[in-house]
Image (cartoon, rainbow, N blue to C red):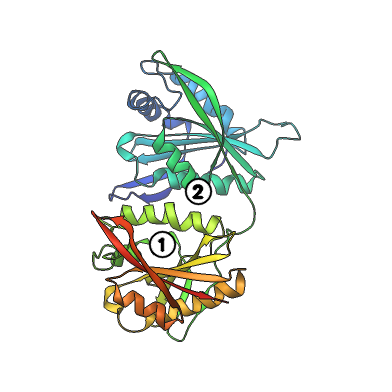
Amino acid sequence: MGIYGPETFRTRDGRTLTIRHCVPDDVPAFLEFQPQVANETQFTLQIPGRTPEAEKIRESWASVIAEPKALRLGAFEGNKVVGQLMFYAEKSPAHPWTQHIGSFGMMILKDYWGQGIGQRLLAIMDDHARAHGISRIEAMVREKNAHGIRLYTRAGFTIEGTRQKAAFIDGEFQNEFTIAKILTSEKPWTPNPLETPRLFLRALTLEDAPAVFDYAKNPNVSRFTQWEPHLSIQDTYAFFADYVFPRYRSQNPEPFGIALKTDPGKIVGTVGCFWASRESRCLELAYAISEPLWGKGLVPEAAAATIEQAFRETNATRIQARCVVENTASARVMEKVGMTREGTLRSALWYRGRFWDMHLYALTR
């Protein structure tokens, strides 16, 4: 079995956990964890009122220890198990055609959902699988398990199909999705970094979340945007999981994090060109920056570099941008980077309880 940890993990609400591989001495803690999971959700294979025998659990875990490709991770708060992930490949000797495939199952107590534990366990599993030559990880997830589906798709899994009537629970058939993730040894794609006289533009990492939250929580920054101010760091983590990382996985050339050369470690804004239409070879420019840096010409500087790279590294023939009519500062940015106002779209957007008119700008080559 794979050996991991101990690793100290801080949940999004500030609790301190330990993540490590499970050992036979953890079986009593698991026997308290398992019935709680069974009573909280029907999305696992744990059956309410049916607790496995301790000796059988120990035997099962002992067989896992003999498999070097297997991994049983536990998330512990003190001596209490609050989450567990089991990863396994085919037992040796595996069929030569399927040695590259691994499977997993994961359980987390409901009070700890949304705290980043599942994301961390999946990331550890990915590293372990790669180290053992696994290039495909698969699992089943109940069709009704919206929380789990969101977690797995954020982590790069795709839904490959539906298994009809996969479970019969409380007199009702339930379907399951087959999900899978293809692992490669290649570094995940990110946009090439850029440099301007005053700025570094680079791909965002999860470590940038606190800095992004610092400006994204300001309602003045999002006054004219289609996203709401971040109310907590969890909103920022969701922005990374739901927007930033999926963009990189699909090789959309954005967003860049904006950092000042005087403080290169701190992200103060974002800028980028995303595909409005690949078929029409049209990109769209978007940006945001911390309020204390408004009016210093930093956004036009970042946007100009982004536009130049987008034309250089993609087949785009048009880059467009939109802003609500009231957002005169954003309109000035578009004009400073050479965009032409093509018109005003009347009542183009219903948002925050009203219709918005929007200016449309574009630059072509």
Is 242 above or below relative to 181? below
| Residue lying furthest right | 96
Foreground residue among 232 and 54: 232
Which badge, 2 or 1, comes first in the chain's sequence? 2
The residue that mark 2 highlights is 123
Q: Looking at the picture, how far across and down is residue 331, in whole percent?
A: 35, 76
**Badges 2 and 1: C-beta atoms under 8 Å apart?**
no
Residue at image position (50%, 28%) is 176
Q: Looking at the picture, how far across and down is residue 147, in whole percent?
A: 39, 38
Foreground residue among 241 and 322: 322
Residue 132's label in the rendered image is none
User: How far, Cα to Cα, is label 2 from label 1?
Assistant: 15 Å
Residue at image position (65%, 43%) is 134
Q: Amino acid at mark 1?
A: Glu
Q: Is residue 263 visible?
A: no
Foreground residue among 50 and 292: 292
Residue at image position (30%, 79%) is 293
Residue 207's label in the rendered image is 1
Neighbourhood count class around disc 1 (C-alpha, 10 Å): few under 14, some 14–19, many 20 upward: few
Is 19 above or below relative to 316? above
| Disc 1, SS | helix
Q: Looking at the picture, how far across and down is residue 153, in whole percent?
A: 49, 44
Q: Looking at the picture, how far across and down is residue 349, in whole percent?
A: 33, 58
Quarter of the image where one finds residue 218 = bottom left
- Describe residue 294's horizontal placement relative to residue 25 as left or right: left
